[in-house]
Amino acid sequence: MSSLVGFVGTRKAKNILFACLARMEYRGYDSAGIATTFSGKMYSYKFAGKLCGLKEYVDKNPSPGTIGLGHLRWASHGPATHKNAHPHLSEDGLVAVVHNGILENYKELKDKLKRRGNVFLSDTDSEVIAHVIAEHLTDGRDLFAAVAYSLPLFEGVYTLAVMSSLQSNVLIGACQGNKLVIAQSAQGTFLISDHSALPDGVEKKAFVESYQLCTVKAGSFHVIDRAR
């Protein structure tokens, strides 16, 4: 089962993401990745193999910012390769997504996007999510609105976390048929698929349930029901 984590706070996100991902290695995975954003730029690194290999590479490259996403993947759509690892970015690089589950209508959505000129870099259903959200984001909506407008298009059971280099202070999470955990500590706020991977010092915990989405900031979070 794939694992995801998001963090936004006052400390460097990279180290916190790696610590949480390391606590979820027991769930099994074939590839790993993280993304952070800072000053309007996205920094994304992916690796087909063990988390330690990804960390060794990231430690030699810039990954600034106090907001980020991390993921451990079990291959479902597409083999266990670098290009199929998460996070997945939109074509313009403005949106990053980590996703657990199956997007059942991804082929239909992907074909429509291709006809509009979108170019895909992976074999996954998950990359489609980033492209769809980015289209709504460039319509002038903020990230929350872009995700909210996109969710009714997605069929299947999933959890996902989204961030954008245009809004470096907020993560958006959503579920359908699964759950996500939100937790706060002195470090910041977490959005995670496995509560046992949270660090010590968590002060507040909530769940994002099916047909809900959430906004997560450094010192606050909100969970909202959405139309079924």
Image (cartoon, rainbow, N blue to C red):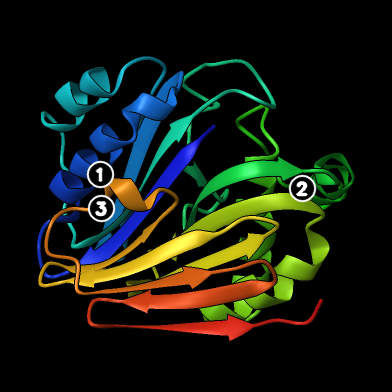
| Label 3 vs 1, first from the N-terminus | 1
Distance of mark 3 from mark 1, alpha carbons?
A: 6 Å
Find residue 46 and report its horizontal and vertical position in percent.
38, 29
Residue tagged by mark 2? 117
Distance of mark 2 from mark 1, alpha carbons?
A: 37 Å
Residue tagged by mark 3? 198
Q: Residue at x 56, y 59 (%)?
A: 179
Task: Mark 3 and mark 1 in contact? Answer it, CB < 8 Å.
Answer: yes
Q: Is residue 170 above or below residue 115?
A: below
Q: Is residue 202 left or right of residue 88?
A: left
Is residue 143 shown to the viewer in this render?
A: no
Disc 1 residue type? Answer: Cys
Residue 48 placement: quadrant: top left
Q: Which of marks 2 and 3 is in front?
A: 3
Disc 2 residue type? Answer: Gly
Q: Is residue 75 left or right of residue 195?
A: right
Between 121 and 146, which is closer to the camera in this rendering? 146
How packed mark 1 is, by other alpha carbons closer than 10 Å (few <14, some 14-19, many 20 or more), is many
Find residue 71 and report its horizontal and vertical position in percent.
41, 39
Distance of mark 2 from mark 3, alpha carbons?
A: 40 Å
Residue tagged by mark 1? 20
Q: Is residue 183 above or below residue 156?
A: below
Q: In this view, does 53 lie above or below 197?
A: above
| Label 2 vs 3, first from the N-terminus | 2
